[in-house]
Structure formats: structure tokens, C-alpha cells
Image: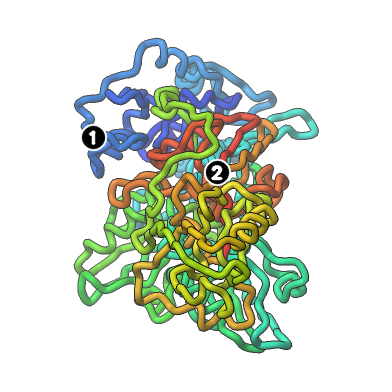
């Protein structure tokens, strides 16, 4: 037990404090997400705890917030004003007494050493244990209650890692889920502010869907795929009166992991559509379903921590490239990384000693209590043979939802006044520029088709979309009939976006206005059509046209992502929440050095939150601006603090494309 802060932590780690009030975001470290300790300023205007920054700089050479090049030597102590503000924060004494004592943070050490009866009792008990001779001569030791979670027993030959810090310290970590603001305190009936932890509960279920007609569509729209920032395949919408709606067990936001025993968690969007459109009377789906937040009080946490055990496991690889077969994730309610799954037939599964939901404390002696899945993967991949795990296990815990995929781990949970997002220019226009074909697999091509025809001859096309559509889509071709002049010409194809006819702009018309414009101009001897064709550059993708017999045709979700920004129709979604609520959504995407600019997408919408209740935001929606500030060019670690700043109201400008129908 640390004699300065009265909490359990490693000697080299930061002190832990139970703060009376929620600490201002400006005084939060972006690495540990706790109030700053020994604050250090970077040349780019960000502030971190000295120890957090020192540990971070041992692995990386850039600022965690804006990724600008950085070395520890360039940083300097924060101003005296900032340090005084931090020292004056009000904290609780970690030892419970008849009344809860509070004091300034800088006064806590002197209080513990000189005035705290709880700390004195703790030291006397410790002395009794060290001197067993005096046992029996003294009064039995008095039980001392503290606000800290009981530390799990570590085998004598085990790791020196302390597996749990205080419940209050865990609370102050906030949620790692991007866009979710941790309600750190909950008002009780007695009027006391007790720490609470929010756990995002998710469970995996196998669902059997029966179809009388094997060719009948399931009736849901999906987004995502490994060729998009979303990664997983996510249900965007369930259509009314469909097979899926009648079954009632699948809902928007569910992640589809398997189809008929085939793992689709790492396939492209087109491959997933092909699997889900495969005809058959019975369909077996494995889905990950979020159930919302469950709250735990500090007392519950203290009780549950006592049941945890530290386990040591060694896996031996035959060579450096051999995979272990472990899927690692981050959780919303705890720092560190956890085992989501052990792949069947993999090295870890055959060994049998690791389990789902084990928290990884260290690998090969490297501390990962505040680590990321990427850091763990790097250690595993560079290990020649023996991979030594130290994990923390608690039986019967529910898995939390993965915060984000390994490729998008630059999340942060609080804002900083020096963040460059404040200096971005606000745009008051309806369209927000971004690179249209950010995906390497798709390219858009504009074409002009001029044809001669008989006045009474039909164009022979059917269309869909229109700005009156709920997704405000541009006009696109749904079929080219063999009786019309466009079929004979052959250049206009199904899926083409129609831009104009005889100079009349079609891009801002609703469906009926577009039909009228096409019919009136088709009566002339010559027609000039301008259209946009979106081409797939990946010849290995399955041909979905063959699979579409019996399905009402509409473009795939992934093809809409290739449209240039002038065809986007943005809409503003205003969310409001209470002070202690989370916004209730997570995001992926943004600028990365290895991938360049990628759009931001909504990946998760949590049941029971403001985003869920509003019902306008959908998984797969692209965020193009927050409160009028364009998101183009921002990294994940820039946009998330900006969302965190918005206390009770935020305006999201989004582009919503319909998911692929299966």
C-alpha cells in the first residue's frame, strides 16, 4: 500500500486518488485518462503525466494526440498555475471512517502519515503479521475498510504485477469506447455520490433461420467488411414483414460472425453478401449482440476482485511465424486487453490453459495492463519460441464489446484545450469534400452517352433513388430493359448514377421529378445522358448478379462509398443527453499514416443510450462534420476528444447510405 496516496499500485506507477468531483477534461491525461500527475507539456501543446509520457516514448516517437514527431527531451514541466490547480483538487481519504474525510490532493500524504486512524490501523496490522511472536498477546486485529478493491493473491513465484487498482481509479479511466462518455458518478437515494462502473454487456448467440422458400431474401441490410474501416459485418436495418423480422431475434447493430459455420468476421463486403444470399431452407447465423450498459458499484467491484486469480501460461511456437490462435480486444469498462476468443485448432486452444475473457497482464515480462491489442500482437510476432502469459481470471464475467479493431486503436477519451481541432475552419455548405474513391478497390468514371432514336421509342430503363428517399440518394438505374434504345446502345448499365439528361440536372431531383424529366426528354430525336459508373477493380470478388435472382435489386452499400462528395446529401442529427450519460456510439476510421484519409463511420450504437433512442443514427453512417467542423483529415484521436467536449448537445453531420440487401 502506497504511503503517499493510500492505494495499491506498483512502485513505478502513478499514484491513485479518489476525487470528490468530476475533474475538468482540461486536467485529464490523454494516455491514462486520469487527472494529471507531474504534468508535462509537449511542443505541440498537449499535456500528459510524466510517467505516462515516459512509458509511451519508450515505444513510440510521436505525440499520442496528433502523431507529430516527439522526444521526451523536447517536453517540459507544465506551468506552476496548472500544477497548483491539480494540487488543489479535492480527494477522499481512501480509508473509510464514521464520516468521509476530504482534503486537497497535496494534503493527503501528510494526513495519512499523521492523522488518519485507518492508515495507522493498517500499519499496525502489517506490523503484527511481520512479528508473529506478538500474536495472541495483542487484541485481534481490527478489520480496516478501504475504498480499494482487494488485491488478488499472487503466487510467490509469480509476476510482481499488481492486478487491480482501486475501484475509484478504474472509474476515472473512463470508457475506452470512442464516443462514449463515462458516467463516473451516480446519485444515490441517500444523496451520496458513489463511484460506478459501466460495463458494455454483449453476448454471442447462434440463431437458426427457417425459410419456406429457399430463395426468399432474409430482409435485412448489412454494412462493413474487412475492406472498409468497419471491419466486421454489421446489421444496419431489419425490413418490416421480412423473414428476419418475423423471427425477431436479430436487430440493427448486431455483428454477424458466422454464416452456416463459415467465419465471415474477416471477409470483404461482397463476400459476406454472397454468403448471406446463398439460398437454402435453413440458415445458421452466429451473431454478437450488445445488450447495453450494466452498472457496478465500487462495493460490488471490491467483492468480485477477491475471486480473481493470476495464472501463468507458456505457449511454445515452432517458429516465429506460427500464430497462437488468439483474438484480443479492449473493453469499455477496464483498461488493458482481454481474450475474446481462442481459434479452434490453434496453439492456445490446444494448450487449453487460456480462457475467453482472461485479462492479459503481461507477455514475456512486458507490462500490458494499460496495453493495446497491437502492442500484444507485436510482442507475440517477434517472439521466436516461448510466449509467457500472465493473465487475470475471474469466473463468470460477461464479455464486453470490442472497442475497436486492431487497425484503429488510436482512441482517446477526453478533450484537451490544445487540440488542433479547435483551429479548423467551419464550413456552412451542404457538401463536405473528401477523396471519393478512398478504397483502392473502387473507382468512379463519368461518361456521356449521346444516342439517336425515334421520338416514340422508349429509353427502356427503370430508376431508383431520389432526394425524397429516406437516404436522399441520387437517381440510379435499376434495370435496362431489352426493348429500349439504351439496351441497344449498351453503354448505360444497371447501377449507373444519372447526372443529367439533355443538360437538365438530375442530381437534386426527387423520384417523381426525375421520372418526369426522363420521359419528357425521351420524346426527342436525340438524347444526351451524363452518368457516373462505379467500377470494381477487384476481379476476384464474387459475381453477385448471379446470386440476385429473387432479390429486389439495389446497389451494394460499398459502391455508394465511391461516390464523389458533390453527390452526397448530408443531414444534421442533433443528439442531447444528461450530464452523466454517454452519447452511446463508437466510431472507426480517420487519418492513419499507413492508410491515409479514411471516412469516419458509426460502428456501434448501444441500446438504451441517447444515440439509440434518437433512432436517426445508423451503423455504417459516415460522419463528415461535428458541430459544423469538417472531419476530413482528422485522426481518430482528434475527433474523439471533440465529441467528448460536447456535454449535453452535439450536432452530427452525416451521410447515410443504405446497406446491402440480403
Is residue 253 placed above or below 140 in the rendered structure? below
Look at discs 2 and 1 and give the one toward the viewer: 1
* Left or right of 391, for residue 74: left
Q: Position of residue 533 (x, y in %)?
A: 44, 62
Query: Is residue 485 visible from the viewing direction of this image?
Result: yes
Helix, strand or loop for disc 1: loop
Is residue 596 placed above or below 463 in the rendered structure? above
Q: Position of residue 636 (x, y in %)?
A: 42, 42
Helix, strand or loop for disc 2: loop
Is residue 223 placed above or below 162 in the rendered structure? below
Which image quarter is the N terminus in?
top left
Is residue 96 placed above or below 250 in the rendered structure? above
Reading the image, the residue beneath label 2 is 149
* Left or right of 176, for residue 215: right
Q: Nearer the viewer, residue 415 or 379?
A: 415
Query: Is residue 121 visible from the viewing direction of this image?
Result: no
| Pointer 1 local density, CA inside 10 Å: few below 14, some 14–19, many at least 20 | few
**Residue at image point 48% right, 39% down:** 432
Q: Position of residue 213 (x, y in %)?
A: 70, 87
| Pointer 2 local density, CA inside 10 Å: few below 14, some 14–19, many at least 20 | many
Q: How many numbered circles does the render carry?
A: 2
Residue 448 figure quarter: bottom left
Q: Nearer the viewer, residue 526 or 427?
A: 526
**Residue at image point 47% right, 56% down:** 530
Which image quarter is the C terminus in?
bottom right
Reading the image, the residue beneath label 1 is 69
Asked whether disc 2 touches disc 1, contact meaning CB atoms under 8 Å apart, the reply is no
**Residue at image point 72% right, 29% down:** 192
**Cα distance between the residues tagged 2 and 1:** 38 Å
Amino acid at each position: 500500500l502506497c504511503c503517499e496516496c493510500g492505494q495499491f499500485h506498483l512502485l513505478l506507477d502513478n499514484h491513485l486518488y479518489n476525487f470528490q468531483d468530476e475533474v475538468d477534461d482540461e486536467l485529464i491525461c490523454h494516455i491514462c485518462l486520469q487527472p494529471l500527475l507531474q504534468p508535462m507539456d509537449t511542443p505541440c501543446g498537449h499535456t500528459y503525466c510524466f510517467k505516462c509520457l515516459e512509458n509511451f516514448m519508450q515505444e513510440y516517437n510521436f505525440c499520442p494526440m496528433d502523431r507529430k514527431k516527439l522526444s521526451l527531451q523536447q517536453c517540459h514541466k507544465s506551468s506552476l498555475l496548472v500544477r497548483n490547480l491539480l494540487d488543489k483538487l479535492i480527494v477522499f481519504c481512501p480509508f473509510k471512517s464514521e464520516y468521509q474525510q476530504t482534503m486537497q490532493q497535496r494534503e493527503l500524504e501528510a494526513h495519512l502519515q499523521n492523522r488518519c486512524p485507518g492508515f495507522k490501523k493498517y500499519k499496525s496490522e502489517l506490523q503484527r503479521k511481520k512479528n508473529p511472536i506478538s500474536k495472541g498477546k495483542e487484541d485481534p486485529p481490527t478489520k480496516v475498510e478501504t475504498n480499494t478493491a482487494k488485491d488478488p493473491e499472487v503466487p510467490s513465484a509469480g509476476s510482481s504485477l499488481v492486478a487491480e487498482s482501486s475501484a475509484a481509479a478504474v472509474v476515472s479511466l473512463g470508457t475506452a469506447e470512442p464516443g462514449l462518455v463515462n458516467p463516473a458518478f451516480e446519485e444515490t437515494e441517500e444523496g451520496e455520490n458513489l463511484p460506478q462502473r459501466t460495463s458494455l454487456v454483449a453476448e454471442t448467440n447462434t440463431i437458426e433461420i427457417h425459410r419456406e422458400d429457399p430463395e426468399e431474401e432474409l430482409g435485412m441490410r448489412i454494412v462493413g467488411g474487412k475492406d472498409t474501416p468497419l471491419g466486421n459485418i454489421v446489421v444496419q436495418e431489419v425490413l418490416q414483414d421480412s423473414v428476419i423480422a418475423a423471427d425477431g431475434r436479430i436487430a440493427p447493430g448486431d455483428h454477424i460472425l458466422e454464416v452456416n459455420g463459415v467465419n465471415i468476421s474477416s471477409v470483404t463486403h461482397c463476400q459476406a453478401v454472397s454468403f448471406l444470399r446463398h439460398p437454402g431452407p435453413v440458415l445458421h447465423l452466429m451473431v454478437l449482440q450488445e445488450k447495453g450498459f450494466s452498472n457496478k458499484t465500487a462495493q460490488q467491484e471490491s467483492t468480485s476482485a477477491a475471486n480473481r486469480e493470476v495464472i501463468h501460461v507458456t505457449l511454445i511456437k515452432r517458429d516465429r511465424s506460427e500464430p497462437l490462435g488468439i483474438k484480443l480486444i479492449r473493453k469499455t469498462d477496464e483498461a488493458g486487453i482481454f481474450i475474446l476468443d481462442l481459434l479452434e485448432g490453434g496453439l492456445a486452444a490446444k494448450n487449453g490453459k487460456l480462457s475467453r475473457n482472461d485479462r492479459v497482464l503481461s507477455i514475456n515480462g512486458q507490462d500490458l495492463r494499460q496495453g493495446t491489442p497491437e502492442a500484444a500482437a507485436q510482442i507475440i510476432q517477434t517472439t521466436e519460441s516461448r510466449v509467457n502469459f500472465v493473465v487475470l481470471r475471474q469466473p463468470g464475467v460477461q464479455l464486453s464489446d470490442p472497442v475497436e479493431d486492431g487497425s484503429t486503436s488510436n482512441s482517446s477519451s477526453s478533450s484537451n484545450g490544445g487540440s488542433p481541432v479547435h483551429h479548423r475552419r467551419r464550413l456552412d455548405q451542404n457538401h463536405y469534400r473528401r477523396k471519393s474513391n478512398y478504397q483502392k478497390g473502387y473507382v468512379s468514371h463519368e461518361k456521356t452517352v449521346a444516342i439517336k432514336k425515334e421520338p416514340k421509342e422508349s429509353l427502356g430503363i427503370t430508376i431508383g433513388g431520389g432526394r425524397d428517399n429516406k437516404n436522399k440518394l441520387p437517381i440510379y438505374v435499376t434495370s435496362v430493359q431489352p426493348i429500349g434504345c439504351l439496351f441497344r446502345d449498351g453503354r448505360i448499365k444497371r447501377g449507373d448514377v444519372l447526372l443529367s439528361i439533355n443538360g437538365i440536372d438530375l442530381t437534386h431531383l426527387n423520384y417523381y421529378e426525375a421520372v418526369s424529366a426522363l420521359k419528357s426528354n425521351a420524346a426527342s430525336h436525340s438524347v444526351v445522358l451524363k452518368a457516373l459508373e462505379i467500377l470494381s477493380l477487384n476481379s476476384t470478388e464474387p459475381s453477385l448478379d448471379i446470386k440476385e435472382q429473387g432479390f429486389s435489386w439495389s446497389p451494394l452499400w460499398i459502391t455508394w462509398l465511391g461516390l464523389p462528395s458533390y453527390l452526397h446529401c448530408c443531414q444534421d442529427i442533433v443528439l442531447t443527453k444528461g450530464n452523466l450519460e454517454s452519447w452511446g456510439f463508437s466510431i472507426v476510421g480517420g487519418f492513419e499514416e499507413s492508410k491515409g484519409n479514411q471516412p469516419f463511420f458509426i460502428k456501434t450504437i448501444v441500446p438504451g443510450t441517447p444515440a439509440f433512442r434518437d433512432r436517426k443514427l445508423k451503423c455504417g453512417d459516415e460522419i463528415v462534420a461535428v458541430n459544423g467542423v469538417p472531419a476530413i483529415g482528422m485522426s481518430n484521436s482528434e475527433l474523439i476528444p471533440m465529441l467528448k467536449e460536447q456535454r449535453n448537445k452535439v450536432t452530427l453531420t452525416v451521410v447515410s447510405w443504405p446497406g446491402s440487401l440480403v
